[in-house]
Image (cartoon, helix red, strand yellow):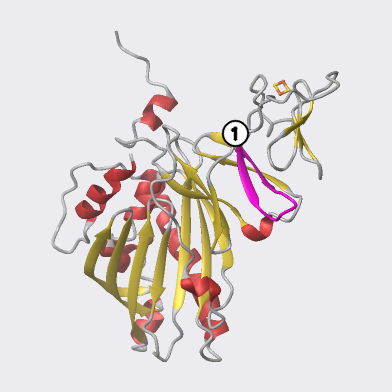
Amino acid sequence: MNRPITLESVSASRFPFSPYPRGWYRIAGSRDLKLGKILVAKICGRDLVVTRSKDGVAHVYDGYCPHLGASLVIGGSFSAEGIQCPFHGWKFDMDGRCIAIPSCPSVPEDAAGLKPWHVRELNNVILGWYCPSGEAPRWEVDPLPESQDRDWSPFRHGKTFAVRSHVQEFMENAVDVAHFACLHRTTTSSIKGGKLRIDGPSLHYEALQVFSLGLIGRWFGISKDVELQIRTLGLGFVCIYANKPGESLPETLVMAYPVPVDENRIKVSTYYSSRKQSVLTPLVEILSLVVGQLTFNQDIPIWENKQYRPYPRLSPADGPILQFRRWAQQFY
Ligand code: FES
Ligand SMILES: [Fe+2]
């Protein structure tokens, strides 16, 4: 029987892998979750509730009531005491415990609480572990040394982009060096890939970029060789170190956290920092922000409209795309 083609079936088949690979994903920015505050998020097709309890610890819970499954995000009420379900009014505190059931004089000992996620808070973000089969985290996340180094500026949240794509497609961009001198020619004259190293869930890639500001830069011969160190952890984090220590321009660090929102959309949050080594640092930070946003705006229409090629016709100019894809298989 011919199955009618719906919009969902077209979009669900856009990629030959699950929209929700296993891994750590950014759930919220640390600064957005003040003490006693509740946030909501949508990650991997689920509604989540994010709280910070009195002890300062961040918690992430499935945003569905353990009683009969009502969404706490749609219609639930949030206060300094906690969360109240809109359906029968059960109340939960910031630690996810059930603290009141209407018309019940006391809460039964075994009353179910909210379902917690594994959470880590570091590098100014709150991360949650997603695994489709509910397994515990398979790898740890460590703070970046720069986040605790006074010589580096505090990690600053740049922008969050919503894109109709997949986290793997976003991450593949990090090793796709050949697209820079074409799509990103306003900022890059050329880029050459270097060593690739794979270490379990992380991938390290080196590249040399000739940075220039478009035609004006080229006309006046203004360009700068920039060494890039690209590091990923799973499909939910990539950071790029630019410039070598001790160079005239300060080292900068650009971080991006792609997150699957639902089957068709991802959200990417960016963060920036740079070494406070000269008067040029604030200028370089602004430049990183502007260049980062410009670059994303150039990438977005490509990501949103491209077809995934499982067997791409690559050329010697391409980066290690197939190695990247083999590495990415471990997250499914
Ligand atoms: S479903 Fe939440 S209180 Fe009943
Ligand atoms: Fe790009």
> How many numbered circles are shown?
1
Q: Residue 51 lies in magenta, yes or no?
A: yes
* Kind of residue indicated by mark 1: Lys
Q: Which of 52 and 313 lies nearest the eye of the viewer?
A: 52
Q: Residue at x 34, y 74 (%)?
A: 228
Q: Residue furthest left?
A: 316
Q: Position of residue 263 (x, y in %)?
A: 45, 35
When asked about the image quadrant of residue 60, the answer is: top right
Local packing at callout 1 (Cα closer than 10 Å; few below 14, some 14-19, many 20+) is some
Q: Which residues are magenta?
A: 48-61
Q: Position of residue 135 (x, y in %)?
A: 42, 37
Q: Does 287 sit above or below residue 97?
A: below
Q: Does 244 sit above or below residue 19?
A: below
Q: Residue at x 28, y 72 (%)?
A: 207
Q: Which of 47 and 224 lies nearest the eye of the viewer?
A: 47
Left or right side of 150 for 193: left
When asked about the image quadrant of residue 85, the answer is: top right
The residue tagged 1 is 115
Q: Which of 129 and 225 lies nearest the eye of the viewer?
A: 129
Q: Residue furthest top?
A: 1
Q: Which of 221 and 300 lies nearest the eye of the viewer?
A: 300
The C terminus is located in which quarter? top left
Image quadrant of ligand 1 equals top right
Q: Position of residue 244 (x, y in %)?
A: 36, 83
Q: Residue furthest front?
A: 109
Element carrying mark 1: loop
The N terminus is located in which quarter? top left
